[in-house]
Amino acid sequence: MAVCLPSAALAQAQPLTLDDAIRRTLAAAPQTASTAARIEAQTAARTAAGLGPQPTIEVTTENFGIPSGDLYDQFQVTATYSQRIERGGKREARVAVVDRDMDVTRAEAIVVRLDVIAQVQRLYVEVQATEAQIGIARQRLTMARMVEAEVKRRVASAKDPLFAGMRATTGVSEASVDVELAIHARDAALKRLAAMWGGASAGLSVPTSDFLSFKHEPVGAAGAAPADLAVFVARGARADAAINLQIANAKRDPTISAGPRFIGSGDVALVAGISLPLGGSRISDARLAEAQAERRRVEADLAVERFTRERAIALAVEKVEETAHEAEAIRDQVIPNADLTLMEVRVGYNRGFFSYVDVSAAQTTLANARARMVDAVRRHHEARVELDRLTGRFTELAKGDF
């Protein structure tokens, strides 16, 4: 089906491809800065997690009062240096948990960027659809003017009443208004698209060649987007790290202390000791059970995600196929017949076999068929957008620097 393109001014505008729109949006997306800040905070947390227990210094005094001859009653000052010794790989386990947190952040950031890309795709399809509507409106205007000229000739030769000419002129006016409204809708859609990266729509144009001239290719079996599943995989790895941390925390850490003791008589002694925490096994067991339950929850969520997305993908594939068949049927069967009907009615009208009402009805049927096709193609591309999001078509582009 031939479709008129927008005005010459837009033809000279800078073509904006889908990839260009996506890259501009991702570069300006605030989600990128938010993810970078989270990674920066987690990097600092990782540094802190890698530090060992800090030593302590304790100073105690004993035997205040009047000195006596008994050594045990002498004033004493003891300075003790204590250091807790971590056992069971606690430091490595803490670092591993933070590392897995960073993996989760990166995986979630990719999913967010995929959602942004899907939003850009929908807006891009909207612009293409409104561009196609402009072409249809222009075709209708051209046809209305041709019919108006034919009607005026018949009115001038007294073959049709005067009101037929007025109706034809009204049809031209309606078609002109439709062109203006279509252009306004296109400009508004283009502004919404440019707003995704905070830019201006002036000087931009969206090509429509691949919109109406799409080739229907059967959609094969596809799996869920790796990026969506990667979030649950990262959460599972984080849960495993948390389990290892709780196992490491169950190991009791001894604290070693040593230092000098100064006695009022002038003597100096050396004291040393070691301490071990008592109890705590019930708390450790409870925390370990909690971490293991969290791991099972993540596995269950992953199974639910796989099941849900497989069903959603199947429905999206059916919708893509259905809309493609509808658009092709209208393009290959309805529009050619409507076009042929209008041509024959016009020829018959010029020969006096039909009335202006017949011409107007045939013209309306053709215009409606073309508009219906654009609507079907739009729904087809929107279904493609949904399928692209579910299968992660733009995953590599969404990864960026993550």
Image (cartoon, rainbow, N blue to C red):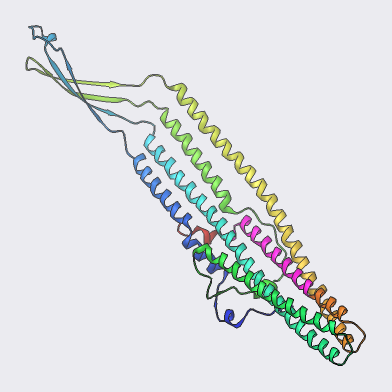
**Residue 94, position as x, y percentages in the image:** 40, 38
Do we see residue 211 in this rendering? yes
Q: Residue at x 57, y 39 (%)?
A: 298
221 relative to 157, above or below: above
Q: Residue furthest right?
A: 353
Q: Does the magenta segment cover residue 384?
A: yes
Answer left or right for 125 relative to 116. Answer: right
* Main SS of residues in magenta: helix
Q: Quadrant of residue 68?
A: top left
Q: Can residue 110 be found in the magenta stretch? A: no
Residue plotted at (71% across, 67% down): 377
Residue 337 visible to the viewer: no
In the rendering, at what x and y percent does residue 373 appear?
75, 70
- Residues 129 and 169: in front is 169
* In the depicted structure, whether residue 300 falls above or below residue 201: above
Which image quadrant is residue 207 in? bottom right
| Residue 331 screen position, x and y as percent | 77, 73
Residue situated in front as seen by the camera: 209 or 289: 209
Q: Which residues are magenta?
A: 367-393
Query: Left or right: 238 with respect to 364?
Result: left
Q: Quadrant of the N terminus?
A: bottom right
